[in-house]
Amino acid sequence: MPNKNCPQCGETLTCNATQDQPCWCAGYPAIMPISAEAECLCRDCLTRAIGRRIAEMITSRSHQSMLEYAGRYRSDGDLIEHIDYTLEAGNYVFSAWYHLKRGTCCGNGCRNCPYGSNVSV
């Protein structure tokens, strides 16, 4: 596939997907609507879009359904910026998605705790 530009930021991107090898984006949560007209996004734009979509889902779906959905991604290895965390002044701030994937509240009063248990133990 020839190089293309991200339709959002203009960055050059290359998809090296083949029948035997999926694209790098296949490792991200399969949460974006799929359409034949959709264009590929660069890593940064895609992770931000997925993060926004997850945040919308968390506010519009039940906690239990999101907990079950996130559980499918519990064994994901690497954390993804804008999906699992953001960086603020060099500190990791874990997202509600990250906490849902974790499966339980840690009791540390995390800012984005989706469990309603924002108190330290």
Image (cartoon, helix red, strand yellow):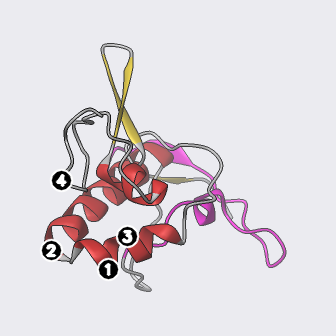
The three-letter amino acid code for the residue at tag 2 is Ser
Q: Secondary structure at mark 4?
A: loop
Tell which circle, 2 or 1, labels the residue nearer the N-terminal end: 2
Q: Residue furthest bottom?
A: 36
The three-letter amino acid code for the residue at tag 1 is Ser
Quadrant housing the C terminus: top left
Q: Which residue is mark 4?
A: 116
For the residues labelled 1 and 3, say whether their Cβ atoms are less than 8 Å apart: yes
Magenta: main secondary structure: loop
- The picture places residue 31, in percent across and down from the top left corner, at 41, 72
- Between 65 and 38, the one lying in front of the other is 65
How many angstroms separate mark 2 from mark 4 (CA)? 16 Å
Q: Residue at x 47, y 63 (%)?
A: 40
For the residues labelled 3 and 2, say whether their Cβ atoms are less than 8 Å apart: no
Side (left or right) of 54 relative to 92: left
Q: Looking at the rendering, which quadrant does residue 20 occupy? A: bottom right
Q: Secondary structure at mark 2?
A: helix
Please identify, in this view, whether the residue under mark 2 or under mark 4 is nearer the observer: 4
For mark 4, does the 10 Å Cα neighbourhood hold few (<14), some (14 to 19), or many (20 or more) residues? few
Reply above or below: 80 against 3. above
- The picture places residue 16, in percent across and down from the top left corner, at 72, 60
* Span highlighted in magenta in the image: 7-32
On residue 67, which mark appears? 3
Quadrant housing the N terminus: bottom right
The three-letter amino acid code for the residue at tag 3 is Leu
For the residues labelled 2 and 1, say whether their Cβ atoms are less than 8 Å apart: no
Q: Which residue is mark 1?
A: 65
Q: Which residue is mark 2?
A: 60
Q: Secondary structure at mark 1?
A: helix
Q: Looking at the rendering, which quadrant does residue 115 occupy? A: bottom left
